[in-house]
Amino acid sequence: MRATFESTRDGILVVDREGGVVRANSRFRDMWRIPKAIVTEGLDARLLTFVLDQLEEPGLFLDKVKALYQTDAVDADVLRFKDGRIFERYSAPLPGPEGINGRVWIFTDTTERSRGEIALQESEARFRQIFEQNPVVALLIDPDSGAILDANRAAEHYYGYDRSTLLAMRIHDFNTLQPSEIAREMALAAREKRNHFEFLHRLASGELRNVEVYSGPVSLGGKTILCSFIHDVTQRKLAEEELTKSRHLLAETERIGKVGGWEFYLDTGKLTWTEAVYQLHEVDPDFAPTVERAIEFYTPASRRILEQAVRRAVEQDEPYDLELEILTAKGHRRSVHTIGRKDPGERKVHGFFQDITERKQAQEALRLAKEQAEKASRAKSEFLAAISHEIRTPMNVVLGISDILLETELDAQQRRYVEMMLRSGGALLGIINDVLDFSRIEAGQFQLVELPFSPRVLVEETVKIMHLSAEQKGLVLDAEILPEVPELVLGDDGRVRQVLINLMGNAIKFTERGGLHLRLSLDPQAPEHLFFTLVDTGIGIAPEHMTRIFEPFTQADAGVTRRFGGTGLGLAISRRLVALMGGELWVDSRLGEGSAFHFTLPARPAESPLARESAEDGADAAEEVRGLRILLAEDMTDNQLLFQLYLKKSPHQLEIVNNGFEAVARVRQESFDLVLMDLQMPGLDGYAATRRIRQWEQEEGRAPLIILALSAHAAIAKKEESLAAGCNDHLTKPIKKQELLKAIRHAAQQRESLDPSERNASAAPA
């Protein structure tokens, strides 16, 4: 095509639909004597000037050019130049996917030729050359019979027939319309003064395609025939159908979703609504919306907000997104969601408008339900906390006295009785802790800590803790820790230990012979996770119970509960704890053969060295602690007696007061090394007493006295509250003797770390 374009003796100019030069061959420039730069640089105005300056009738030529740009006609003409030259001019439209893309102009210099048959034949030959090489489907048709007189190669390729077959056909063989219908369509086109049609053509394969046909008369061989250019618009038709469907779907969506669109044109002040917006305002279809009338629908409070938002959108290009209220034309109050933004390109503000009344009502109902649920949850939590406090307080005495009794001279039967009492008390305490943990997890109030710990040490220490229980049942308990396990990771070692103790406790409970094997490695599927596996040779779990055992307050069956006891909370809590820590817990089991519990945890690397608490404990125990003067603020006589017994053989001196008022008074009057402050006392509680002591110390310029909070509340929030009041640490009842002595040792170490002047300042009497 490019070689033909450049080698032809005719000047060819291709322009777009606005007349801008798209392409011109060198022959065109030579014939019109136009500098190359004017064409190649797109200087369209200068090009037209060059053309008009050379013609005898430039105005007539210009009028014809303008007329042709307004039509899709094929046209030929003769141009006469001021210097005597004569050109034949031929012009035809260039159809494209979206209609006419421009025109092609062909100029033939006929100055030296006769105006007779030779020129006509050569013109026809040139037309046929362009016709044949045109990439657009083209047909020459007898207007009377519809017979196809000629077809180009593009037509052969498109319709799927060879040229000889096409020349034996009529246009009616393609068109799915009847000849009479085609005639009516062409007559209608003539009345509407258009030369393009849309038909459905059948290809050789039988496939039906939508086509757009541009036709015009041309003279060939002394006969007027139709030249038709055919463009496939099937995809465009499909797109139009999809667009129609989309519009219908959008209309249905607006109706169902109660959402509509609007536009406000700033230059004209015109406001347009979609159908849904009319429905939302409950106005008739003939209602003429204006900005002023639209604003009136809003309630006074909403109106002020919207007016300010629209003003900012217009003046500052600031979009808005608001939830407001309107009163419809029928007086109904509705909540609406309106969004608007300015389109600077079209000088308009547009957006959408949605009825959210039902959503608002549902949100309000949900809010009320949430408040009720939270209220019930708080009531449950408060009830459980109160029950826990009331049980822990006497349990402190029961377990403490049992501990003391074991230190006395007892015969075998008495020792067994006391140990039974300790185990039962410990079991009851475990149940209380499980219920509280589960309640906190359910309420979303469970808090984890993230500190460095050694997985290897944790497993070894946990196995030591559980070894005695296994040994008492004649079971073997061992652990295997693979070398790949990192030395330090970040996490909550206390909760990991709780999960292991729960799983090992269950395994020991349900295993009569054999033993337990705990294995720690990295997860082969996810090497950035720790992988724990506990295998036992116990009673196993039936397949239908594999899921139920992780449900709260559930065991495999009622017989298990009767035989082995328990609340059924341990596994439920363990699974939820593992999930909270970013892992997963599951079980494999065969009834009568045993079970294997697995869980994974993220092995996040620790950045700081781990302080070995066990080593510190050993150092504490080995260090000789001098006697401290200790003040106990406790209102219950039983607990007073218990602490006296705990410290009876220690070097410490214990003084006792019954409430917060007495504690504050004694601290001001006497010197103490340590205060054990019960938080719940009549008159002035431990929180208030601690705050008064801290205030007095600050006013007097005294070093802070070490104060340890004592509470039967196990919630983390209570510990945080006591620390916020000024306590140094928090001990949760029931408090074991060794736990108390350890806390006292730590207090003594803290005191010894003070400068002598500070130590004396805190101990000096007021």
Image (cartoon, rainbow, N blue to C red):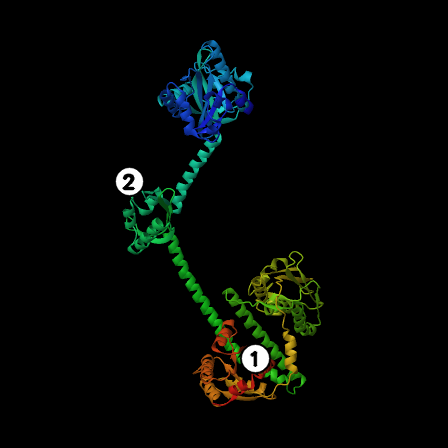
Position of 107 relative to 307 (above/below): above
- How far from the left and from the top, in percent, is residue 668? 47, 88
Residue 192 is left or right of residue 485, and the answer is left
Residue 547 figure quarter: bottom right
Res. 413 image quadrant:
bottom right
Name the residue beneath numbered marker 2. 286
**Which quadrant holds residue 479?**
bottom right
Q: What residue type is labelled 2?
A: Asp
Instruction: Tell me the quadrant of the picture where the N terminus can be found.
Output: top right
How many residues crowd around disc 1 within 10 Å: few (fewer than 14), some, or many (20 or more)?
Answer: many
Q: Distance between the residues labelled 1 and 2?
A: 82 Å
Residue 483 horizontal/vertical position (percent): 71, 64
Query: Along the line of sight, which residue is nearer the eye, 327 or 439?
Result: 327
Q: Position of residue 181 (x, y in %)?
A: 41, 20
Q: Which of 608 and 231 is in front in this view?
A: 608
Residue 410 x, y percent position in the rendering: 65, 86
Q: Which residue lies at the image location 58% right of the left edge and 77% below the top edge?
A: 425
Q: Provide the secondary structure element on which disc 2 rests.
A: loop
Residue type pointed to by label 1: Ile
- Residue 190 sits above or below residue 662 on the image: above
Q: Residue 88 carries which label?
A: none
Front-lying residue, 472 or 605: 605
Q: Which mark is residue 735?
A: 1
Return the disc, 1 or 2, that comes first in the chain's sequence.
2
Instruction: Give the mark toward the camera: 1 or 2.
Output: 2
SS for callout 1: loop
Could you tell me if residue 480 is visible in this image? yes
Camera-side residue of 653 and 417: 653
Please indicate, yes or no, whether residue 671 appears anywhere in the rendered image. Answer: no
